[in-house]
Amino acid sequence: KAGVTQTPRYLIKTRGQQVTLSCSPISGHRSVSWYQQTPGQGLQFLFEYFSETQRNKGNFPGRFSGRQFSNSRSEMNVSTLELGDSALYLCASSQIKTGGQNSPLHFGNGTRLTVT
Amino acid sequence: QKEVEQDPGPLSVPEGAIVSLNCTYSNSAFQYFMWYRQYSRKGPELLMYTYSSGNKEDGRFTAQVDKSSKYISLFIRDSQPSDSATYLCAMRSGYNKLIFGAGTRLAVHP
């Protein structure tokens, strides 16, 4: 079974631009979450989508947004990029089991975003 | 105070040693506990997934959860150089929102 796939692997953008990152979850996984990883703050939760609906959101400004498509694939967008947005952006997927039982999150290898 | 505290290390051990990694947390509502391993330039890889208190073993890895002390541990037996990585503890808070520790860098030298 293929793992979580994130594209592109690397991105270089300049301040003020916007960027879109893509994530394909593991087949059969319907929940997709996004995380930001930086040396200073570690791994921080951005948001989670299930059935094309955002179910949970972290403490990030509105410049960070996302969406999920009917095939469970997800994109996140960052507008008006700032230098501090330079980070590794990680996508994770999980199954949603019957009865609401939780299953673990499986991560992709991330998109390394550099803002200059 | 952070919700999850984890010593960032680095931790350096000889090959074959038993490694003990630990996290403490403050939110007694956490029920699902995970350990991830992250190699350089890779995403976190799930090692252990446990629910509530107790022990769980998988090969050379043992995860322990003590909810009364708000303390979780990961033990690695017969450590190998290939175990050199950053180990992250994580706890589930709401819909697939994980709260991560800072990560402990482990180096296993031959």
Image (cartoon, coloured by chain):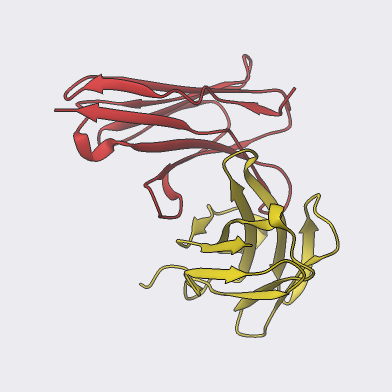
Chain colours: A yellow, B red
Q: Outermost residue toward the top?
A: B69
Percent from the top left, x then y, of residue A22?
Answer: 58, 76
Q: Nearer the viewer, residue B38 or B57?
A: B38
The quadrant of the rendering that contains the N terminus of chain B is top right
* Image height of B92 relative to A107, above or below: above
Q: How many numbered circles are shown?
A: 0
Using the image as rendered, state which of residue A21 and residue A113 is in the foreground.
Answer: A113
| Left or right of B94 in this view: B38 | left
Describe residue A54's horizontal placement relative to residue B9 as left or right.
right
Q: Is residue B20 visible?
A: yes
Above or below residue A7? Residue B30 is above
**Looking at the rendering, in which quadrant would you find the C terminus of chain B?**
top left
Residue at 71% over, 67% down? A49
Q: Residue furthest right?
A: A62
**Location of residue A12 in the rendering, given as x and y in whole percent from the top left corner:** 57, 69
| Location of residue A20 with respect to B64 vertically, above or below | below
Residue A69 coordinates in the image, percent (x, y): 67, 83
* Coordinates of residue B102 in the picture (x, y in percent): 56, 33
B106 or A54, nearer to the observer: B106
Q: Is residue A47 left or right of residue B83?
A: right
Q: Residue at x 27, y 37 (%)?
A: B83
Examine the image and state in which quarter residue A19 appears. Answer: bottom right
Whether residue A93 is visible here, answered yes or no, is no
Could you tell me which residue is drawn at 49 percent across and 57 percent down?
Answer: A106
- Residue that lies at the very extreme toward the bottom in this rendered image: A70
